[in-house]
Image: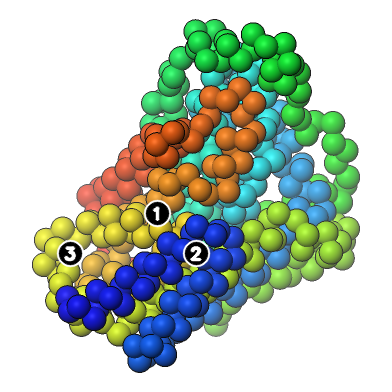
Amino acid sequence: MSALMIIQLLVVLAALYVGSRYGSLALGAISGIGLAILVFGFGLKPGTPPTDVIYIIIAAVTCAGTLQASGGMDWMIQIAERMLRKHPDHITFLAPLVTFFLTVLVGTGHVVYTIMPIICDIALKKGIRPERPCGVASVASQVGITCSPIAAAVVAFVTISNANGYMVTIPHVLMVTIPACVIGLMCASAASYRRGKDLDKDPAFQARIADPEQRRYIYGGSATTLDKVITKEAKASVFVFLGALLVIVLFAFCQMIKLDGKPLATVLGIPKMNIIIQIIMLTAAACNIMFCKAAPKKAVAGAVWQSGMVAVVAIYGIAWLADTYFGNYMDQMKLMLSGVVTNYPWSIAFVFFLVSVLINSQGAVVVAMLPLAYELGIAGPVLLGVLPSVYGYFFIPNYPSDIATVNFDRSGTTVIGKYLLNHSFMMPGLISVLVSTVVGYLITNVFFPGYFASFIS
């Protein structure tokens, strides 16, 4: 690795670091500064912006935004809350499953903001240390991204893999990531079940509630969505959204079914999945607006739409910056890393994880690093197996869902530690990602190697 390559890599890392410190739109925007330095300062050839993935995110976020605007998301949260309140003793296991599957359905982990205060409230009322369910539930809300048929990480993995000759489909990805991630989360929940001291034995907590004002603050409030009135239009929007997801999955299955040795989708002249997802999501969004009273202004003002647009900018800037750097030095990268990835192809999981720690976006990790992984000669089944490793931004607790969870926990047990890395999300995050990645790798490369290798074109 030449001195010039190292200097340019430091430019890339500096842009990502500074962007992560500012957060929100800055991660993508400041990547533009790094891109300008590489192109105009060092004369590198510009890479290609990830337009296909960006279009899909825009369509999916628009649909999810109209779901929120119509009140459909409130109904989904109500259903989840009823289940949690019915089984409060098992909140440490049920809470992460709820946040996980909400993310799987909606395609974004920011839905956690509505359900997290409820999880904290249920735990407090039951005398359970809120850190136990809250820490793993926040992690689970992000883990679900690699298991959602409309999430950028999944769609990008399929799109880039197909372009590199690995003709995997969305159902194939979900067949690996969903069981792997659920097993990982249950392991993290088990490790969290007795985590920390019980509230009645925690001197710090007991000292807090000894103050009458603090006691009223901790136990006086009650977070709930059960008092919200759910309209028939709100319920209809949920069915529109779920119907759109079902149609997308059915189209994806058409790519799996073979007819005369060709995918059924090819025989029937069905467009590629990136086009199908955009059409179906935009159509569902239009139905929510016209028939389910989803006001467009309310949709674009909602948290789901706004966070999705932030993700678009982040992926746009980060992926373009990474593609520019790696594209100009692909031969050198192959020479440096070929020995490691040939002998230990699964080691690419560490690269995915470390990049995710820096850039706070699983979709951006996939878009930026997956082409490099294929160029290095790593097989598609290996990359599919280690896909859960693209979630690493719990490591430094600066992600909005983690910060919000700390604030929602009135007991003060969910914390960002004095030394930054000793926080409430570290243990469940590490266990979940490690177990999920190992299980995913075993599914694709040990238990069913022939099946997942059969998609190579």
Give the residue type at disc 1. Val
Left/right of residue 229 with respect to residue 270 in the rendered view: right
Between disc 3 and disc 2, whose residue precedes?
2
Mark 3 and mark 2: span between their CA atoms? 30 Å
Give the residue type at disc 2. Gly
Is the residue under label 2 in contact with that under label 1 (CB below 8 Å)?
Answer: no
**Pointer 2 residue:** 19
Mark 3 and mark 1: span between their CA atoms? 21 Å
Is disc 1 surrounded by few (<14), some (14 to 19) or many (20+) residues within 10 Å? Answer: many
Element carrying mark 3: helix
Is the residue under label 1 in contact with that under label 3 (CB below 8 Å)?
Answer: no
Whether residue 257 is visible to the viewer of this picture, yes or no, is no
Residue at 33%, 56% (x, y): give it. Answer: 354
Give the residue type at disc 3. Val
**Pointer 1 residue:** 357
Q: Nearer the viewer, mark 3 or mark 1?
A: 1
Whether residue 441 is visible to the viewer of this picture, yes or no, is yes
Q: Position of residue 325 (x, y in %)?
A: 34, 79
Of 93 and 115, nearer the camera is 115
Residue at 86%, 51% (x, y): give it. Answer: 233
Element carrying mark 2: helix
Of 455 and 435, nearer the camera is 435
Q: Position of residue 428 (x, y in %)?
A: 41, 35
Q: Position of residue 130 (x, y in %)?
A: 56, 24
Left/right of residue 403 with respect to residue 217 in the rendered view: left
Q: Nearer the viewer, mark 1 or mark 2?
A: 2
Element carrying mark 1: helix
Between disc 3 and disc 1, whose residue precedes?
3
Between disc 1 and disc 2, whose residue precedes?
2
